[in-house]
Image: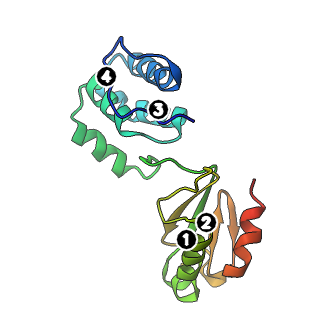
Amino acid sequence: MEPIEAEVRPRGEIGAGYAGMIFRQIQEIIDETGGQAGGIIRVLQQAQGLIGYLPAPVIKTISRDLRIPLSEVYGIISFYHFFSMVPKGKHVIQVCMGTSCYVKGGQRILDTLRKGWGLEPGGITHDGRFSLETVRCLGCCGLSPVMAIGEDVHRKVKPSQLKDILNSYR
Ligand code: FES
């Protein structure tokens, strides 16, 4: 996927290529709201659905065209946890760092993911296959340390198992 260029395109001068196509579709989504500020969440959701996350130039375009201050748009994005300003991998790894998981080795899982895959919390692998997040509790503290990949929850994870676990996700 091409990166979204770092400038906000003037309306009517969107250009060609992948970024042009994305901006064109986003402006169609904005136009469907009739420029109503109340449609901001729907516009952000659809833009994220299109790209996978919300890059800064897209956020600025939405702010400009809906005439909502940029700070307000960023406020909405940070309020709702489902919005992301960073690209996510094909598979999202969530390592639990709640008390029980932390005590039982959550940090060792994070250390192994950093050393073996170059993954930091909030980061993504070079091939876009995995991104990493930390969470506070995945609801199965009795089986800690716990890690989720997508919908799958892996319990009592040992760092030595990570290679096999990650290799099972293509
Ligand atoms: S603290 Fe990790 S699952 Fe609850």
Task: Indicate the quadrant where residue 76 lies.
Answer: top left
Label 3 neighbourhood size at 10 Å, few (<14), some (14-19), many (20+)?
Answer: many
Secondary structure type for disc 2: helix
Residue 156 visible: no
Give whichever of discs 2 and 4 has the lower sequence position.
4
Q: Which residue is mark 2?
A: 117
Residue 47: which disc?
3
The quarter in which the N terminus is drawn is top right
Residue 36: which disc?
4
Q: Which residue is mark 1?
A: 114
Q: Which numbered disc, 1 or 3, marks the residue closer to the eye?
A: 1
Give whichever of discs 1 and 4 has the lower sequence position.
4
Amino acid carrying label 1: it is: Arg
Task: Measure the alpha-carbon separation of dots 1 and 2.
Answer: 6 Å
Give whichever of discs 1 and 3 has the lower sequence position.
3
Task: Measure the alpha-carbon separation of dots 1 and 4.
Answer: 44 Å
Give whichever of discs 3 and 4 has the lower sequence position.
4
Task: Indicate the quadrant where residue 28 lies.
Answer: top left
Task: Measure the alpha-carbon separation of dots 2 and 4.
Answer: 44 Å
State whether residue 9 is above or below residue 63. above
Residue 25: which disc?
none
- Name the residue nearer the viewer: 122 or 149: 122
Task: Measure the alpha-carbon separation of dots 1 and 3.
Answer: 30 Å
Amino acid carrying label 3: it is: Ala
Q: Residue at x 53, y 32 (%)?
A: 50
Q: Position of residue 56 (x, y in %)?
A: 35, 39
State whether residue 29 is above or below residue 131. above
Give whichever of discs 3 and 2 has the lower sequence position.
3
Disc 1 and disc 2 in contact, CB within 8 angstroms:
yes
